[in-house]
Amino acid sequence: MTAGRPQYDLAIIGAGINGAGIARDAALRGLKVIVLDKDDMCTGCSWISSRLIHGGLRYLEYAEIPLVYESLRERRCLLVTAQHLVQPLRISIPVFAGARRGPLLIRLGMIAYDLLSIRKRLPNHQMLQRDEIRQEEPGLRAEGLRAAARYYDAQVPYAERLVLENLLAARDAGAAVNTHCEVTAIRVSDGAVSSLEYVDRSDGSSHAINVATVVNAAGPWVDRVLETAPVRTKRHVGGTKGSHIIVGQFEGAPRDAFYVEAAADGRPFFIIPWNGQYLIGTTDIRYDGDLDNIRASDAEVDYLLSETNRVFPQAELGRQHIHYAYAGVRPLPHQDKGPESAITRRHIIKVNEHVAKGLISIIGGKLTTYRSLAEQTVDRVAKLKGLRLPDCRTHETMLPGATGIDAATARLRSLNVLSEPGVARLLGIYGGRAADVAALCDADARLAVAIDDDRTVLAAEVPFAIRNEFAKSLCDIIFRRMM
């Protein structure tokens, strides 16, 4: 430990949903925290998800009952504490002749799902006859259709904003958030973590800080981060690639989200209305390639198109209908054998004491369960360091934009420059913090203008992202702030 350097109780490497959640929890409990990420926040696996806050219905097949229970509990929590970002989503499961999962198995799964979500805020499931689901979804394939189940989960249309709001809450509680800063060395003294070195990729400057504990929450890059420590360790992460495609409205498109068993391999996938388009995915393929250059393969794209066309035959979707595709790697525990879908989705909080005391790595995790993962991680840090910290309160603490929504609505309308869809867009992105965006217009009238033909985007959003939301580049602003 070197005198004169900034001193932190906890350094978190990775500004995805897990790193952001840990930072928020730790800062709220009084620790001095710094977050470092080599790119912008939410540029790894957090944004490549299906954008669902869900219990993980298919995890019941692998008897991961505790994970489903935990996920359903966290879903209930987020529907309150992140109410501006997380909304209920109605999902239908069609059952076709010859499917691996017949009506009885689906119904049993639905009953178990309902029972595990005691005190839930969403309705119980329904079983629908063939004619009932066809009446509501006439574009659904009729041939071989036997029945359907309908249930509720939740959707987070802008997962990037969920990550951001956790970082904002961490900052408000005193944490430092440094994006575009790559850790180059984890230094160890007397067998314990003592300092970190990092490079600010924005200007090339080098920095060093003293730290008591490091949490490696780098997702698929966990093993790469561990390589910056002086002691080698075995491989922790053996991820699987998941790819999605985004298409526009199509003939026979569903009104609700659909969870469908693929004919090719029996793996369930989603067809989800999203942002005026349809999000289709995901795949699940073992991946050992370049983590910084992940793309949906031709085979994956063809698979998703073919399976969607099978369920909604009027769609006739082809590559020309794809707006874009995205892919990423799930940071799952390394496993040499067995089907990809059977690899546990439960997170592991790995204490790397064989490398250095005070070094912890996060393996796995789901978007849905980030808050409980964060609570468990901070509890582990406190135990390792012998700290007496206040109890976690993130389960009842609203995220920054989850309050003041009515006042923000009135404030946006008072500008008289946004259409009603524009007001709805800003509320869906910023929640109550939309009033802070509008406040910039008071200081500079040039910002009180809509910058698109539909009057849905406010000029003030650009400086707001730079001044208030850690944005450092045009890509940061467009893709992960203004959405």
Image (cartoon, grey):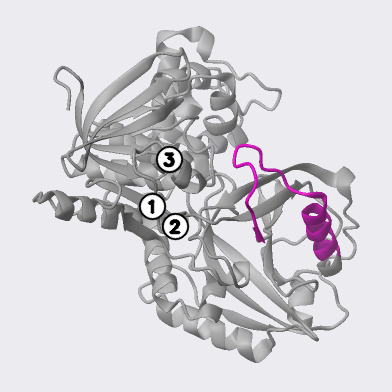
User: SS for tag 1?
Assistant: strand
Residue at 79%, 53% (x, y): give it: 301
Is there a contact, CB below 8 Å, between mark 3 and mark 2?
no
Q: Amino acid at mark 2?
A: Gly
Depth check: 63 or 77 in front? 63
Residue under label 3:
227
Residue at 87%, 56% (x, y): give it: 251
The image quadrant where one finds the N terminus is top left
Residue under label 2:
365
Percent of width and height locating residue 387:
10, 49
- Tell me the magenta residue range: 285-309
Marked residue nearer the N-terminal end (3 or 1): 3
Of tags 3 and 2, the one toward the viewer is: 3
* CA–CA distance in space, label 3 to label 2: 21 Å
Residue at 56%, 36% (x, y): give it: 425
Please say whether residue 153 is one of the residues in the magenta stretch.
no
User: SS for tag 3?
Assistant: loop
Depth check: 380 or 266 in front? 380
Of tags 3 and 1, the one toward the viewer is: 3
Percent of width and height locating residue 338:
60, 73
Marked residue nearer the N-terminal end (3 or 2): 3
Disc assigned to residue 362: 1
Q: Amino acid at mark 3?
A: Glu
* CA–CA distance in space, label 3 to label 1: 15 Å
Of tags 1 and 2, the one toward the viewer is: 1
Is there a contact, CB below 8 Å, between mark 1 and mark 2?
yes
Quadrant in which residue 373 is drawn: bottom left
Q: Amino acid at mark 1?
A: Ile
Residue 73 visible in the current orientation: yes
Residue at 81%, 45% (x, y): give it: 322
